[in-house]
């Protein structure tokens, strides 16, 4: 199903906002946060890192995500940071997610030119004076590419045509940078006490894994489709719902059989963000990429799971009965993707990298499978078994 989005791409105010006013006392877990302790914590970190004696005020604006809430910290020296606070009650898995995201951000800043927030401090526990797990990081004075230029109502997720080539060139540079970070095992990034990096287990999957085949075996056993049958029946066409349900249930086992019969690529394996939606790309009003955020689910992944930025992903033809909206035609996206892959190939040569990334992105069957796996994890409804 294709739905064209009507209306202008540009609006008078090209710089919208994803920050909102929020009554913290009414927000469950947030009501237990000691905001004064958070201010004092930030002041202490500022003094320790920079020797600055400052005061700190929490902004009244808050940005809410599925797992985190973000609040800005404004200092008397004119600088600002953010506190990224976990919304869930702390569990070993949620705390591990925080640690591995911090580790990944440190690694990306050390080994690449990818623009990511600087982490100043973090607390991976719920017993600190603030009362919740949180990260203190740099404030990026921009807005997400999704919320900018009027947001979804104005552009339906499309990149303005005059900025498209510029945006894709920047994202190609970022993706080449990510793929340059490689490890011999598949898993999550962990920073060790001596400052080096290793690979640990992936939440919900396990590991680390020495081969892609081992990863796919574990993935097919443990990966869960996050949408229940009731919701699927509500959203799927009545004449397709039974087929869709059976295909969702069968997809992991079919993928396992596919991995057994398919020769997977060997390591070293690349770092991959896995959630390169425009909502995680911070830009300015000229579409300059200021930062890539939300690295919680980034992993060192098998090459078979590496895909183009979400802007250039297309629902595989075998899933054509999915409830999916696409503002641009598949033909245009394919053309943009070919140009993007040429950009990647040129950057690989420029930076004297091998061509594994561009070859992976050029494999249309492989891209269909990779996108299907990420769609499965994201709960997108469709006939997955038509792909294998």
Image (cartoon, grey):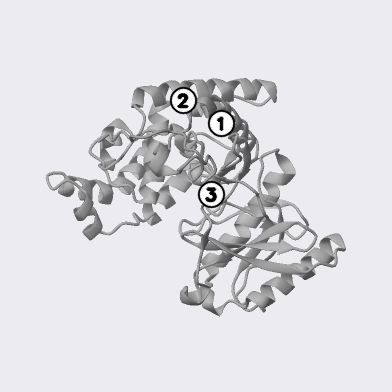
Q: Residue at x 39, y 23 (%)?
A: 332
Name the image quarter holding residue 372. top left
Residue picked out by circle 2: 337
Look at discs 1 and 2 and give the one toward the viewer. Answer: 1
Q: Residue 132: which quarter of the image?
A: bottom right
- Distance between the alpha carbons at the discs numbered 3 and 2: 30 Å
Q: Residue furthest front?
A: 12
For residue 329, side relative to residue 25 (left or right): left
- At mark 2, the secondary structure is helix
Q: Residues within 10 Å of mark 2 (few under 14, many from 20)?
A: many
Residue depicted at 31% across the width and 39% down the height = 325
**Which quarter of the rendered picture does the N terminus lie within?**
top left
Residue 311, above or below 25: above
Along the horizontal axis of the image, is 384 left or right of 361? left
Residue pointed to by mark 1: 167
Pick the front one: 105 or 245:
105
Q: Which sits earlier in the primary sequence, circle 1 or circle 3?
A: 1
Q: Which residue appears farthest toward the left when viewing the image?
A: 239
Q: How many residues crowd mark 1 within 10 Å: few (<14), some (14–19), many (20+)?
A: some
Q: Quadrant of residue 358?
A: top right
173, above or below 196, in the image = above
Mark sitting earlier along the chain (1/2): 1
Q: Residue at the location (46% across, 23% down)?
A: 336
């Amino acid at each position: 199903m294709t739905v064209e989005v009507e209306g202008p791409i540009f609006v008078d105010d090209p710089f919208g906002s994803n920050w909102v006013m929020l009554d913290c006392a009414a927000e469950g877990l947030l009501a237990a946060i000691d905001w004064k302790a958070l201010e004092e914590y930030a002041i202490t970190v500022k003094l320790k890192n920079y020797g600055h004696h400052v005061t700190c005020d929490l902004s009244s604006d808050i940005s809410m995500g599925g797992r985190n809430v973000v609040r800005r910290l404004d200092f008397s020296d004119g600088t600002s940071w953010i506190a990224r606070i976990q919304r869930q009650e702390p569990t070993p898995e949620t705390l591990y997610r925080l640690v591995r995201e911090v580790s990944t951000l440190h690694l990306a800043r050390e080994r690449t030119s990818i623009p990511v927030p600087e982490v100043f401090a973090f607390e991976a526990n719920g017993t600190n004076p603030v009362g919740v797990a949180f990260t203190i990081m740099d404030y990026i004075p921009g807005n997400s590419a999704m919320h900018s230029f009027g947001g979804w109502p104005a552009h339906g997720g499309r990149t303005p045509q005059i900025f498209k080539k510029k945006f894709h060139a920047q994202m190609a540079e970022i993706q080449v940078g990510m793929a340059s970070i490689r490890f011999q095992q598949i898993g999550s990034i962990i920073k060790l006490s001596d400052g080096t990096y290793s690979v640990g287990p992936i939440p919900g999957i396990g590991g680390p894994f020495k081969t892609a085949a081992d990863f796919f075996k574990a993935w097919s056993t443990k990966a869960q489709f996050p949408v229940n049958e009731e919701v699927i029946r509500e959203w799927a066409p009545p004449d397709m719902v039974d087929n869709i349900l059976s295909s969702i249930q069968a997809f992991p086992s079919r993928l396992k059989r596919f991995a057994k019969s398919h020769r997977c690529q060997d390591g070293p394996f690349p770092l991959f963000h896995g959630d390169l939606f425009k909502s995680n790309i911070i830009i300015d009003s000229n579409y300059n990429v200021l930062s890539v955020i939300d690295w919680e689910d980034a992993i060192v992944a098998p090459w078979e799971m590496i895909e183009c930025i979400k802007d250039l992903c297309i629902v595989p033809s075998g899933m054509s009965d999915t409830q999916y909206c696409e503002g641009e035609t598949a033909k245009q996206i394919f053309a943009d993707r070919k140009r993007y892959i040429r950009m990647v190939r040129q950057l690989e040569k420029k930076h004297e990298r091998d061509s594994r990334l561009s070859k992976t992105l050029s494999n249309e069957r492989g891209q269909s499978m990779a996108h299907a796996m990420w769609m499965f994890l994201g709960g997108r409804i469709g006939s997955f078994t038509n792909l294998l």
